[in-house]
Amino acid sequence: MSKNPPVVMPVELIEFYQALIKLQTEIGELLVKPQWQIDEAQAFQHQYQGKPWLEIVHLGIEPPVFARVWRQMAEFLAEQRPPVREEIERILATQNELDFGELATRAVQQDEGYLAGKAARLGVNSSLFFLLAEHAVRPFMRGAALVLAPYIDQERWLKDVCPVCGKKASISKLREEDGKRVMFCPHCSTEWLYRHLACPQCGNDDHQSIRFFTVEGYDAHQVYVCEKCKGYIKTYDEKKGGPLNNIELEDVKTIYLDMLAEREGYVNDSLQKKLLH
């Protein structure tokens, strides 16, 4: 099924996310990576009990380091997105009232209840506070994911959540070489294999209740929807569109697919709070 052509993403918004991804990468390269010694008991918990790695090992983020990255990310957002600069400055003004150890832990967990409550007590915008926490913690998450990647059995995991942090995927791709589905975690950037025709929101694999739609003129971009749970996943088909160099940026560029899916009544639990204004 084909939908109408998409709303084109503004060039300046794409450039903003390119700069954001670049900044997070640069920060991540300067951070000290975790030094875990994975033992057999931990490997068993992951491989056979199906626990994501960050439920087994602790990602200890030093509060002063997180405070520095938090401020760096806030200053970047204030500079790049003038409409929210005043709100970001209000958040920065509360820095002395924050427990950055606790904040880092809650950001890793994406504990929206805690973050929203903290924002309310501070009297700042809760959506921006969550967004800042999410983007500030990503360099740490990605560093952890790189360390843990060798301990993931891709052929065995095949679950609907990230093997590192346990979050849902925001987008997937069908690999050009073998057609296998690769999921992408927006929280830690881990990629993992998943069943081709199964819903990553509820696990439903009844092919009669799973379908996909495309947008006219954009056949490589597909949205798989599940009629059982009303979930969806954006998917890029490399056999139709060629190799995908940056799946994270593709996730941003295809926000219009999220809009189309939501308009049709479908939801994705991983959908990020994006700074669109």
Image (cartoon, grey):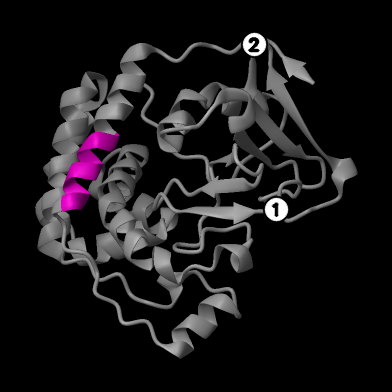
What is the magenta range? 21-29
Residue 23 within the magenta-colored segment of the rendering: yes
Q: What residue type is labelled 1?
A: Arg
Residue 262 visible, this angle: no
Task: For label 2, count other residues whose C-alpha is less than 10 Å away and answer few (under 14), some (14-19) or many (20+).
Answer: few
Q: In which quarter of the image is the C terminus?
A: top left
Q: Which amino acid does label 2 sit on?
A: Gly
- Describe the element under mark 2 as helix, strand or loop: loop
Task: For label 1, count other residues whose C-alpha is less than 10 Å away and answer few (under 14), some (14-19) or many (20+).
Answer: some
Count every numbered label the image shows and give the total: 2
Left or right position of 58 against 244: left
Residue at the spot x=24%, y=43% of the render?
A: 25
Residue receiving disc 1: 195
Magenta span: predominant SS is: helix
User: Closer to the camera, 241 or 251?
Assistant: 241
User: Closer to the camera, 200 or 192?
Assistant: 192
Residue 119 visible, this angle: yes
* Outermost residue, right side: 208
Residue 114 at what x, y percent from top left? 38, 58
Which mark is drawn over residue 217? 2
Residue 132 at what x, y percent from top left? 28, 43
| Between discs 2 and 1, the one toward the N terminus | 1
Residue at the spot x=45%, y=15% of the render?
A: 9
- Rounded to the nearest whole Å, what is the CA distance between mark 2 and mark 1? 26 Å
* Residue 209 lies in quadrant: top right
